[in-house]
Amino acid sequence: MVATNFAERQQRARGRLRLLRLQFVFLTLVGLIPFTIILALVLGVATGGVGFLLLMEPFIDIALGQASSGIVLRCTVSLGISTSAMLLFVYLRRRSFRRAGERFARNGQAIKVSRRPDDPWRQLRNVVDEMALVYGIPAPSLYLLPQSELINALSIGHSPADAALMVTRGAVERLKRAELQALVAHEFSHILNGDMAFGIRVCAWISAFNLCPSAGLFILRMPWHDRFKSRPWDKKIGATIGWALYGIPIGTGLTLIGLPHFFAARFLQSGLGRERERLADASALGATRDAAAIKGALLKTAVYGSTFPDAPQDFVDSAHMFFAAVDVRRWLSSHPPIEERLRAVDAGFRDDEIAEFREREGVRELRERRLETAAIASREQQAHARHPFAALIFGTASLPTKPADPLRWRTFRTPTLPPLDEIDSAPRSALLALLFDGPDRVLELQLAMIEETLGADTRASAQRLSGLVATLSVEQRMPLLDRVLPSLREIDAKEARVLQELLSRLALVDLEVEVFEFALMRMVGAFLGDLHAPRALHGNRTLAASANELRVLFSVLAGRGSTEARSARGAYEAGLSRLLPTTRPEYVSLGSWVNKLDHALRVLDTLQPMAKQALVEAMFTTVRHDQCLTVEESELVRAISASLHFPVPPFSELLAL
């Protein structure tokens, strides 16, 4: 199961990271000592001290316990300045990682993968869309890194809303489809469990720690730089003398001063990366249930390599966020050894399997990949011919022969669908059209609101798509919402506020909010909030402190799943008793539930990860109480999941519990 043990593994990983953070803080303070000493010496000169002995006098006095108040003040000011400078640099560095996907794609010369049918990397797009549907989150922006030999991938961003996934060309060309799914599932784990936001904070600290040693090494290597070599001989001699007199001492000093922070950065990156990679491998195994595919991806990574010859500095600073190591260092590496990861997936793995696998690879692997590509293309044509909506959700994914889940199967069987190119060309208009429901008078009011807010062109586009969207069955609305949500990454914060206000007005035009309308507004609100105001995905609130909010949530969920009060009360008790086994509030039938549930979800979003997992499992206990999953229940579960920032497994798995 995708979510089984998800929060438990995350909680254990957080526990092990506490010691790492304490050690990191210690190394940070040790690294600030040289900066403090230098600043104190500079302040000593500025206040009248002359000569080395006079400069060292304050520290001699401190060592002898004879420090005056002026000396203590000078050292305190120096420590404050050095600490403030570092924190300011970290803050600016974190701000520079806004829209990190675009930045990393630009630095890595990556190509953006679209949903166009003629895109040559459509298979990768389909795999990512499949994983997004499995995990119940919007598909991340997708980029292809140009390295044709390497097998690696990177997920970057602050939250699922602004997540970007980058995969090397070598991974797409060399991995089989199941292996590519395993690699993508591994990166989706980083997106879901908060690794990206934490990883970006770590990137900012690593950049700050590497600043001095990097500057020192740059100065020491100056005579070997191309610009230095291209100078005329007369200028080169003078520059060499200046470098020997000033560059060597300054470069050596900066390098030595930054050594404690350099080791702190390596230590932090190594500890964080190794722990998170183990968690991501386990999550990928739970999502794909295919240990052979994960093993195959790791074996090919070991054979073909994952390290970038000339990695951009951003890639080096974010090495802990890649699928595999980006450099060749073994000491304090950002990832566990491939052999260790293989043993975790396959307990019977032998070290000589890598050599054996290397010998088997070559022409046979290329031939099999081409045959598989042809088979996938054939299945795609059959899927379009029989079930067009399967292509909207799964792309080239093969369809089940028997319905494992009635709700999901009905989604695939609907034959009448809007053209994908029209939906993809105007996704925002399609989003607005999803709220069109009612008599012509209501529709005219909604169109007038759109024209007033976004202009006549958007009104015409939404009106044109309204007929197409109206052909969808109720089960198809949520998959279409998942498809258009990623397009909102292109709008800024002001446009996001305008869009949210417009969606609220469109939903309330008939003075009644349906479940899907509520789900749409919650999912769009959570997406845009994470995009423009990223924050921690989880908090420290307990279930016991959230009894009133749980009462509202389970009352609404149980009430929407049953028309009879007795059955609804039974579903309510079945779910809430798993969270509050001893004492719990009574079931209440809520007539006006929208605002109350909205407030409850804001509070419950601050729960601990383990509490959120228990809440998700309890919700499915309520849902399956009557052995029937309604569309409204599925829409509510998706809205609650998005609001809680917690992954929901496929319904078929949790309904089988």
Image: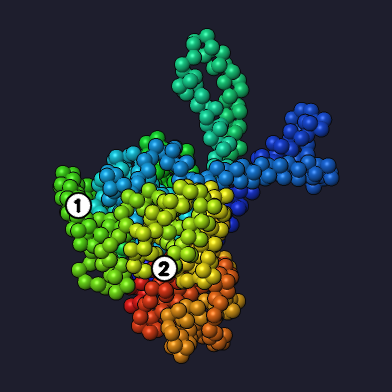
Which image quadrant: the N terminus? bottom left
Place of residue 392 in the rendered image (x, y in percent of width and height, measured from the top left): 31, 57
Quadrant where the C terminus is found in the figure: bottom left
Decide: is 518 above or below 485: below
Which residue is farthest top? 234
Q: Left or right: 194 with respect to 120?
A: right
Which disc, if any, is residue 86? none
Using the image as rendered, state which of residue 83 and residue 148 is in the foreground: 148
- Could you tell me which secondary element the residue under label 2 belongs to? loop
What kind of residue is marked 1? Ala
Residue for badge 2: 648
- The three-letter amino acid code for the residue at tag 2 is Val
Q: Position of residue 46 (x, y in %)?
A: 79, 31
Q: Which residue is mark 1?
A: 377
Q: Is residue 161 visible?
A: yes
| Helix, strand or loop for disc 1 | helix
Q: Is residue 633 left or right of residue 419?
A: right
Q: Position of residue 217 (x, y in %)?
A: 52, 31
Q: What's the coloring here? A: rainbow
Q: Residue at x 44, y 68 (%)?
A: 438
Q: Is residue 247 left or right of residue 285?
A: right
Q: Is residue 418 above or below residue 646?
A: above
Kindly indicate the quadrant of the structure image that contains residue 345. Answer: bottom left
Query: Do the residues under discs 2 and 1 have CB atoms within 8 angstroms?
Result: no
Give the camera-side residue of 35 and 657.
Answer: 657
Q: Residue at x 31, y 63 (%)?
A: 288
Residue drawn at x 26%, y 67% as measured from the top left: 413
Position of residue 130 in the picture relative to residue 155 (left or right): left
